[in-house]
Amino acid sequence: MNPTLRVAELKSLIAYHNHRYYTLDSPEISDASYDALLKELELLENLYPQLKTTDSPSQRVGSPPRESFKKVPHFPPMLSLANAFNKEALGEFNLRVCELLGATSVEYICEPKLDGLAISVTYVQGKLIRGATRGNGEVGEDITHNILTIQNLPKRLEGEAGLLDTLELRGEVFIQKTDFQNLNALRAQHNEPLFANPRNAAAGSLRQLDARVVAGRPLSVFLYELAQGKTFASHLQKLEWMEAHGLPVNPLRFHAKGLGEVETFYQQLLQERATLPYEMDGLVVKVDLTEFRERLGEASKNPRWAVAYKFPSEEVETRVEDIQVGVGRTGVLTPFALLRPVMVGGACISRATLHNEDELLRKDIHIGDWVFVRRAGDVIPEIVAPIPSRRTGGERPFSFPPLCPSCQAAVYRVPNQATTRCTGLSCPAQLCAKICHFASRTAMDIEGLGEQRAEQLIEAGLVKRLVDIYHLNFEQLMAQPRMGEKSCQKLLAAIEHSKTCRLARFIFALGIHQVGEVTAKALAAHFQNIEALMRANFEELTKVHDIGPEVAREILEHFANPNNCQLINDFLAVGIAFVAENLTPASGGHALSGKRLVLTGSLSTLSREQAKAEIEKRGGKVTETVSAKTNWVVAGENAGSKLEKAKAWGLDILDEQQLKQLLES
Ligand code: IVH
């Protein structure tokens, strides 16, 4: 496959899985599969540096924070860890550390890797004043109200820690195994949905907007890093100081004199794992000496001085009760197995995706088969393989249906791909998935129009094409079951509000194959209006930055279909209008195009959001943290540590006047 297309595909796949993992707390693929995607992307970006963009998931950690919480910038950013899935990978990590330091052996501190949620907590003169989630690593969510409910986290610190101006610590919030069982038992009594595992319960609790709910959740925390306030010669000294000042630090840790001792401790913990009161998915191995850590520094999002040495994933046997097929937005049929419910790695599992027909055939899974199911700590399950010795002869091989399970139209295999598609033009399952995509937050952002609502509207015959969303009225909605007056008004208001939108969002919302958010932005910037995009020919499309022949063909094919053109005309007729955006093509020659800026301090004539929007319009990017990739730091009134850092690094610093000149140039 063409590398440009593969990179685009990998970016959107990774963004999707980030969203599932970080925002929905509901991952679909294993850690190892996720890592494989990321590795492939990094490899391609190294081979073809021109394909590496600053918004690539290889440059970021996680997904953006939810809108409903106040944002908290993290400085330094909250990094993630590289994984080592076996002894060899750990050996490679150690070798790299030794090589970079010019040492033959290095001392490490080993800590359990708890399966929870990373947080940052800040004390000012001993008083706990703020707690935040990691978010995307650079900006998290302010969850102070929830952090204050955590029992084992002191609200006030004494002694030297109580005198420090600012003390910022990082750690992991988690729920102990027994607390988790009690919590779910209680939820069962109240007929509330059960949490799948302790991690989801902890994550879901921390993101509650109502702290009273959180207070009823048995959250615990262990702190493992000190980000601001005091420095130490070694990690161990840091942990001991934290412990001596009443901060919750995991007493289980090990000072390893070298690689061999890390391995011994790992084996020992692997044995003890089941007896520990909390879930852990491996060891975190950290270089002890601060001086070494500083010399090693960090790669784009992982420190070079630490690694997560993961435990092998647990495999459990269960039975495939049935195999069914789901239909997605683009009509792709995805088979999945319904499993006899089974506990794997602390979660109850009852279904697993089988990806596509080829994967199903490769794994040779039959209905009724006993299979091995695996789940690496914090991810949803996959079927590893069937157990042929347990076959009794009553198993049935599954054959892909010739007709769509939702609309009974014929299905077809896309040539040279593992994909099977439904050909139905009015397939309810496709329409439902299309509506969900159209209404999603990064598309038209129509809150209240999720899967269940979409299904309901289709079933009632109210929505037959996407544009029908804009024909819904109060009486029709009120006639639907489970629809109150308030939610009805809210939904109609959200639909109305979505009529004025950015062109890029609208293009993305159309759900054209291969046109993700980034491509939609590039198209909007280039064509500036929807009619020009509809009229564009192959040459014009491939002129757009980042658009290759395959994507161009998809777009042409989309608009060659008169139904799709009619749909757009109908959207315009119901009053969809685009906010004026003086978009300069991203590849264009503006001085800010492709540049990374950091804003610090307050500007007198522009708000930060305005400045950011103006810079982005000209193809620039505004980031939260000063890094080696920063081109300019814009310093306003009362600029703080970012300005200091920029000065120390000798970066170009602009004042407000200079920024304005640049914007006007
Ligand atoms: S150190 C830069 N220590 O693992 C160092 N992380 O995959 C970053 N985690 O986001 C973290 N236990 O949520 C560290 N003892 C521990 C940890 C730990 C769990 C989590 C943490 C982090 C993730 C990285």
Image (tube, grey):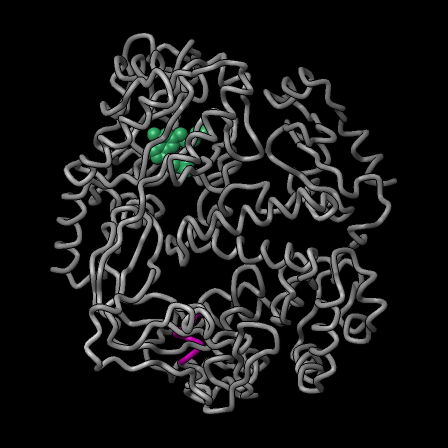
**Residue 647, image x, y percentages:** 69, 17
Judge whether residue 16 is colored magenta.
no
Left or right placement of residue 165 versus residue 276 in this view: right
- Along the viewing direction, whichever of 189 and 409 lies nearer the viewer: 409
- Along the viewing direction, whichever of 337 and 621 lies nearer the viewer: 337
| Residue range of the region highlighted in magenta in the rendering | 449-455
Left or right placement of residue 340 versus residue 236 in this view: left
Ligand 1 in which quarter: top left
Which image quadrant for residue 84? top left
Q: In the rendered image, is residue 263 in sight?
A: yes
Numbered-mark total: 0
Residue occupying the point 58% across, 57% down: 12
Tell me if residue 73 comes above or below residue 426 in the rendering: above
Judge whether residue 453 is colored magenta.
yes
Residue occupying the point 31% across, 21% down: 261
Residue occupying the point 28% across, 24% down: 155
